[in-house]
Amino acid sequence: MPAVEVIEAAREVTLDEVESALVVAFRRARVALNNGRAVVVLVREEDLLGHGDPPAAAVAGALVGLVRALATEGVRNDWRVNALATTDAVSASDRSEWIDRLSDVHGASGVVVRLGQLHLGRLSV
């Protein structure tokens, strides 16, 4: 299994800190990918769905966008960059197993996997 850079979205972020949180995540991802490591971005499902604080939701949404952009940019270089959305109810072992799956060199890139159940029964608009 290749080395993986796990980038976790900040849980407590203010509106003034959103930009710097995204810049730090971008820089970490680029360094990891340029050094041959996969990247898995962890976000809270609540934030991804906009149920949390607005700044945290902004960071989660932007990080998912970053994952998709880097996956597209890295097609020629076989970059593996994915996102994992979880809730506090998801066990550490389940989270770890999915990080391994999402960083597999033969796996997909640009994917968001949701382990929580908050999105069930909701319509995407």
Image (cartoon, rainbow, N blue to C red):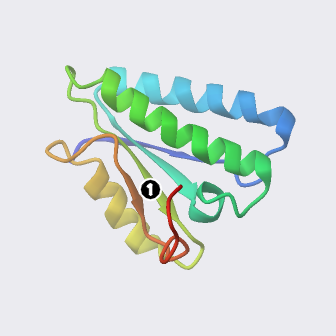
Q: Position of residue 5 (x, y in %)?
A: 42, 40
Number of numbered discs: 1
Residue that carries the numbered disc 1 in the rendered image: 84
Q: Residue furthest left?
A: 106
**Dot 1 surroundings within 10 Å: few (below 14), some, or many (20 or more)?**
many
State the image quarter where residue 2 is shown.
Answer: top left
Placement of 15 over or under 104, stated as above or below: above
- The residue depicted at 29 percent of the width and 37 percent of the height is 80
Q: Is residue 99 left or right of residue 2?
A: right
- The residue depicted at 51 percent of the width and 70 percent of the height is 119
Q: What kind of element bears circle 1?
A: strand
Q: Nearer the viewer, residue 90 or 75?
A: 75
Q: Is residue 78 left or right of residue 27?
A: left
Placement of 109 over or under 71, stated as above or below: below
- The residue depicted at 57 percent of the width and 63 percent of the height is 45
Residue 35 makes an appearance in the image = no
Q: Position of residue 6 (x, y in %)?
A: 46, 46
Q: Position of residue 96 (x, y in %)?
A: 39, 64
Residue 84 makes an appearance in the image = yes
Q: Position of residue 7 (x, y in %)?
A: 52, 43
Placement of 89 over or under 103, stated as above or below: below
Which amino acid does the dot numbered 1 rest on?
Leu
Q: Nearer the viewer, residue 87 or 99?
A: 87
- The residue depicted at 59 percent of the width and 55 percent of the height is 48
